[in-house]
Amino acid sequence: MRLDISQHMKMDQRMALAPRMIQSMEILQLPILALQERIEQEMLSNPVLELEEPETNETPNPPETATSSLDTPEGEKSLKIGDDNNKTQDFERLNNIGDDYDDYMGRSSYLPSRRSQDGRDAKMEAMNNTAAPNKSLNEYLHDQWAFMECEEITHKIGSVIIDHIDDAGYLSVELSSLPEKVRVPVRPDQMEEALLLVQTLEPSGVGARNLTECMLIQLRHSSETRTLEIELVKQHLKDLEMNRYPQVERKTGRSIADIKKAVENISHLDLRPGLQIGRRETPYILPDVIVEYDEENDSFTAHLSDSSIPSLRISQTYADMIKKGKLPTDAKEFLQNNIQSARWLIESIAQRKGTLLRVVNQVLSNQQVFFRSGPQHLKPLPMVEVAEVLGIHVATVSRAVSGKYMQTPTGIYPLRYFFSGGKTNASGESVSWDAIKAKLREIVDNEDKNEPYGDDQLVEKLSESGMNVARRTVAKYRAALNIPPARRRRQFE
């Protein structure tokens, strides 16, 4: 076997993503809130980035002459050495310099004040207006349990039980597995006694081991008598779930009207009572795009809600420092890298704005009927089609709409909602799948609840609206919309 070393030339074509392109794609994909956070991080890490102040029409005051009060403020005299050996007047002026200096600094425009013009500190005011964090469910239950009057062993067991209640308010482990965590010998009846006491805490229903027990706790703690409701939950919950009201009527001997009233009371119970307490933040949505109706042109127009995005620029001070060329090599290289990074960020933000506007304008031109008539008239709009019209890659369109929202006169929608497939109806028009779902929801909402439509009837109703879909498609969409079958939607008098 012969081993040797040789050189070969090979031509190869590959696609490599430059750092600038990667950053541009990242900026394009960020929603407006995430973009604001990204800009703040860049401002902290890149010294050459600065905010571009809005232009003002105010003209600066003309420069003062040599005899202005800035040179010789009122009441100030030049220090002269006179014949007075005691220098009494001069020492008095030196003692008053501190007061004069403080007054001058208060009037000076060179030092920014932390307080606003009305005397308020913006940061302190924001901290004062910030709500204190809520107590967790565990803390809330322990605070109540501390005032519970019971034996010491029961109090210890209750504390252990509370530590094993999840955020929804349910006991997350088997009660029989907790005695070893109490660290003292306990009997099963002591465990049950402590659990019953824990179940008396607020919110009503906490400490339950299952859904049925959670409902029973709330019904027993109700200020009104709930005998029928308790019986229904204990013995007939499955029949009620399957809408078998005649069978429940026959078994309980109560009228359907009484049963329906009891079911209504049961429906008001909280199935996850623990979520009433705790640190939960409501997700905040800030639309990236706002669509408004233009009455003059009878059309809809869109603009980006980017007023909260600060305008950036490269600091002229650092740019001049590089031009002068008197910096050490490492300092010059540091500034050049930061200026290049800042320039890329500014260009990426501008490119994001342009790409997003182009995509949104395509949505407007294709979905005018939707904005006028509602979700039932949403047309199919594949991303590939938009990408071909704009001359960009389909992945760019996907990144442009990812995680972003559009505010319309009828509500706020995810921007991706307007990009969906569909089919052609009987009239030859394209109808999106979401439009079919909206029509299906409307048909079910307006049906006779005493004789609800079956899936075959829903197919016929959709066909009458020009939407020809298969029965299995109706069943799939009905399940996706959480619409139960006809047997469970039927109402009894």
Image: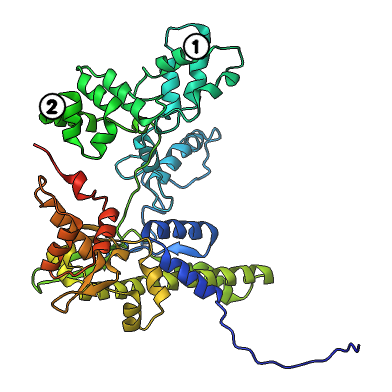
Residue position marked by numbered label 2 in the rendering: 258
x then y, percent, for residue 108: 40, 50
Q: Secondary structure at mark 1?
A: helix
Q: Viewed as shown, does residue 259 lie left or right of 122?
A: left
Q: Which mark is residue 190?
A: 1
Crowd rating for badge 2 (residues with CA inside 10 Å; few <14, some 14–19, many 20+):
few
Which residue is drawn at the image coordinates 52% and 7% (left, top)?
A: 152
Amino acid type, label 1: Gln
The answer to which image quadrant residue 58 occupies is bottom left
Q: Quadrant of the C terminus?
A: top left
Q: Quadrant of the N terminus?
A: bottom right
- How is colour applied across the structure in the image? rainbow
x then y, percent, for residue 469: 22, 68
x then y, percent, for residue 125: 35, 38
Q: Secondary structure at mark 2?
A: helix
Which residue is drawn at the image coordinates 41% and 58% (left, top)?
A: 36
Which residue is drawn at the image coordinates 18% and 32% (left, top)?
A: 264
User: Is residue 358 visible in the rendered structure shown here?
Assistant: yes
Looking at this view, is 25 or 65 the one in front?
Answer: 25
x then y, percent, for residue 481: 26, 53
Looking at this view, is 325 or 403 the one in front?
Answer: 403
Marks 1 and 2 in Cβ contact (< 8 Å): no
User: Is residue 56 visible in the rendered structure shown here?
Assistant: no
Crowd rating for badge 1 (residues with CA inside 10 Å; few <14, some 14–19, many 20+):
some
Front tag of 1 and 2 = 2
Amino acid type, label 2: Asp
Looking at this view, is 43 or 446 the one in front?
Answer: 446
